[in-house]
Amino acid sequence: MDFLRSVPLLSTLLLVERDGMTFLDALPILRNGILAGVVVAVVSAFLGVYVILKRIVFVSAAISQISSLGVACAFLVAVFFGHRASEVKSQFLSGPGLTSVVFACVAAIILARQVSEKRITRESILGIGYLLPAGLTLLILDVLSAEAHAIEDILFGNSVFVSVEQLRVQVVTAGAVLLIHLLFYKEFIFTSLDPETATACGMRTQLFNRILLLTIAFTISVSIMSIGALPVFAFMVIPASAALTLTERLRNAFLLSVVFGVSAALVGFYLSFVFALPTGPAMLTTAGFFLIPGGLRTLVQRWRRG
Amino acid sequence: MSVLLAAHDLSIGYGGRALLSGIELSIEQGDWWGVVGPNGAGKTTLIKTLLGIIPVLAGRIERRTGLSFGYVPQRGVIDDIFPLPALDVVVMGRYPRIGPCRRVTRADRELALHYMGRVGIAHLARKPFRSLSGGQKQRTLIARGLVPEPDVLVLDEPTDGMDLAGETGIMELISDLQRGSGRTLLMISHSLNLVANHAKQLMLIHGAEGVFRTGMTDELLNSKTLEEMYHLSVAVHSFAGRRFLFAHGSTDTKEKA
């Protein structure tokens, strides 16, 4: 501790006090939350590059709502059969966690299908896929008003206090998703860039598209239960958008996006402690700052072109 | 000559609705097919069906075992949001050959560079694909179509939207590639004038009229066939070893008059 006090910048950052407790003192309590935030940031920011490149931002929004509906439905069914919210919450992996993942994955498979846009556009389907589950979830929360707090805790996450079990699920999910992406990187890129040519050359485009969307669905459904829907959506969209405005190399875009995501998670978490801010919005707002370099670069390029 | 691909009593279309039925077709090693027809005639639907991109409605397609395709889509298909150097786009053509869970090797990159050289754009390898001109993008996609060294190379409107110089350059390149390799080539075009001087065989398609004709270019390019196809009075002239087609007006209008 004395050593930290002697390093000017570190002492200023880590030993800042809030309510008589320094950030360093609070670290053991906050550790799981910080780790969960970082793990979610890594995997979401990585997948976010696909979300932006494939122009499926609203697919991820719809999946997160449908996943939330899965959680709410698990509670509704359990309460209907006479169980209490605390019991459902304690059997998280076999209850709301499972229904959340199942709902998200089914949604991903349905949304992966190509639809004829003669009568209804893809945007309309995504809008409906977002709005209907959102409305149903709110109705279920209203019906289960006595249990609403327990459900909201899972639905909107609690970035500060994450259980060891939840952290373990998060790490395993992120590891599995990143491994799949490491193994099938070429296939995901080719089938995303030019699905018809990939099919013509003998690639199983539909299969890889489904796997890609399933990894996104799985990540969203597990992550929103760790840190909440808003920061997960932010990590899927903002770091990747910022990275893609700064580089002409796809691999660099993945790397930059992850660096931005992790930085936003850490800085956001720290700021939320120091200024007593809600953690999710603090991480989201911090991520927003990474859009500035890309915005400035675009402005300079336009100015140079006249 | 060995048959690479044959279609028997084939029906093509989208969403269960047949656009054209009863298609009989045989494509052999070393053929150079021009696939021609008016806009919306079903050219792309036919080619996508042959490639397996869209399902067959009825009938059957026989492909030689291990038959491989290189496909050159219209350049607008590639979304400029992807930050990829031209070389990376070309290397993608090797991905199906490399297979899942395996890395791109130096040999794959060298092969990609070789084909970029063949189409005259090796110096653009490091340039972002999205910053290239229309003609350069088209050459990049042709290199990508060639890099898996396929049995059949299929090109969809490779000169669409190009100026005269770009159009001539691309057509000369395609003809040179075909002469040099003896590779089977299928090229979709709505421009009969363009295909008439390069392709050895023609597929004439007009889905709305139920017309599907195949044959040697010399045999099919005559006023009678083209009038049936386009309902236009078309004159075919030869000058300095090249064919020129002139449309003189609608035959329907003349009949009414």
Image (spheres, rainbow, N blue to C red):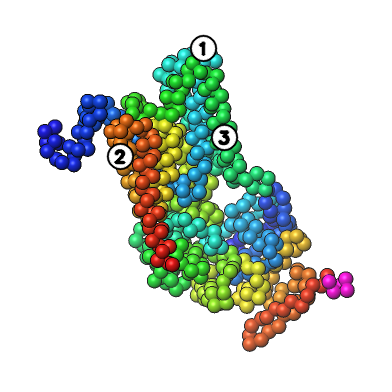
Q: Nearer the viewer, residue A88 or B116?
A: A88
- Look at mark 1 in the image and give the residue it sits on: A82
Identify the amino acid type marked 1.
Gly
**Secondary structure found at label 3:** helix
Q: Earlier in the sequence, mark 1 or mark 3?
A: 1
Magenta-highlighted stretch: main secondary structure? Answer: helix
Give, as a single range, the part of the protein colored magenta: B253-257
Is A62 situated left or right of B87 in this image? right
- Look at mark 2 in the image and give the residue it sits on: A267
Q: Is residue B196 above or below residue A201?
A: below
- Please identify the residue farthest to the right as the structure is shown: B257
Examine the image and state in which quarter residue B249 appears.
bottom right
**Secondary structure found at label 1:** loop
Q: Looking at the picture, do discs 2 and 1 lie on one chain?
A: yes
Identify the amino acid type marked 2.
Val
- Look at mark 3 in the image and give the residue it sits on: A131
**Secondary structure found at label 2:** helix
Identify the amino acid type marked 3.
Leu
Neighbour tally class for label 3: few under 14, some 14-19, many 20 plus, Cα within 10 Å = some
Q: Check the residue under mark 3 and report the chain it is in.
A: A
Is A178 situated left or right of A96 in this image? left
Q: Is residue A87 above or below residue A222?
A: above
Q: CA distance from mark 2 to mark 3?
A: 32 Å
Q: CA distance from mark 2 to mark 1?
A: 43 Å
- Please identify the residue farthest to the top as the structure is shown: A82
Check the picture and name the quadrant holding the C terminus of chain B.
bottom right
- Residue located 39% across and 49% down the image: A291
Q: Is residue A40 above or below residue A248?
A: above
